[in-house]
Amino acid sequence: MLRPVIDDDGAPFWKYAASGELRVQTCAAPACGEPRFPPRPCCPHCGSFDSEWRPTSGRGRIWSFVLPHPPLLPGYAEQAPYNAVVVELLDAPRIRLVGNVVTAPDAPLNSVDPARLRIGAGVRVVFTRDGLPRWRLERA
């Protein structure tokens, strides 16, 4: 399984994820307050270097998805077909996260029938034992 590369800007995201929380970096300037992802030192909206990590509801909708087919990286070929989704967060619509829709946090990547995926389908974040965010369909 691929592991995230954790840099200084993104370290808080992974710290919160390891404790089962989905938080996004948000500009702390009083006149701004815009969420941003990926994390970075400066707000792209107002230029402020002040930020905080605000909790989200963990709910979103599938904005886009793809079903990769071989040839794939060897560790993933046996799981094909599986999904790779882009999720738009409901409480921060400009924030889109990439992940997989699964039946349970530590389920295989191919645990959801691809025919069940739809653009706009509601999803909720779940976290693996290792703190990786994944998504479950809200309507089973």
Image: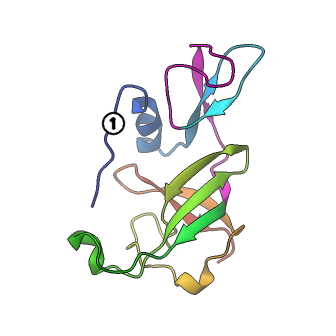
* Amino acid on which the number 1 mark rests in the picture: Ile
Kindly identify the residue that appears in the image at 65 percent across and 41 percent down. 56
Question: Which quadrant holds residue 60?
Answer: bottom right
Vertical position of residue 95 compared to residue 11: above or below: below
Question: Which quadrant holds residue 34?
Answer: top right
Vertical position of residue 51 compared to residue 103: above or below: above
| Quadrant of the image containing the C terminus | bottom right
- Dot 1 falls on a residue whose secondary structure is loop
Q: Viewed as shown, does residue 88 lie left or right of 100? A: right
Residue at image mark 1:
6
Does 39 lie within the magenta span? yes
Structural crowding at the residue carrying mark 1, measured as other residues with C-alpha within 10 Å and reported as few (<14), some (14–19) or many (≥20): few
| Quadrant of the image containing the N terminus | bottom left
Kindly identify the residue that appears in the image at 34 percent across and 31 percent down. 7
- Return the residue found at the far left: 74
Observer-nearest residue: 72 or 140?
Answer: 72
Q: Main secondary structure of the magenta part?
A: loop
Observer-nearest residue: 25 or 137?
Answer: 25
Kindly identify the residue that appears in the image at 55 percent across and 43 percent down. 22
What segment carries the magenta color?
Answer: 38-61
Observer-nearest residue: 128 or 119?
Answer: 119
Picture coordinates of residue 88, whole percent (x, y): 66, 53
The colour scheme applied to this rendered structure is: rainbow
Q: Viewed as shown, does residue 104 lie left or right of 56? A: left
Question: Which quadrant holds residue 9?
Answer: top left
Does 115 lie within the magenta span? no
Kindly identify the residue that appears in the image at 31 percent across and 41 percent down. 5
Vertical position of residue 48 compared to residue 23: above or below: above
Q: Viewed as shown, does residue 57 lie left or right of 22? A: right
Picture coordinates of residue 6, whole percent (x, y): 33, 36
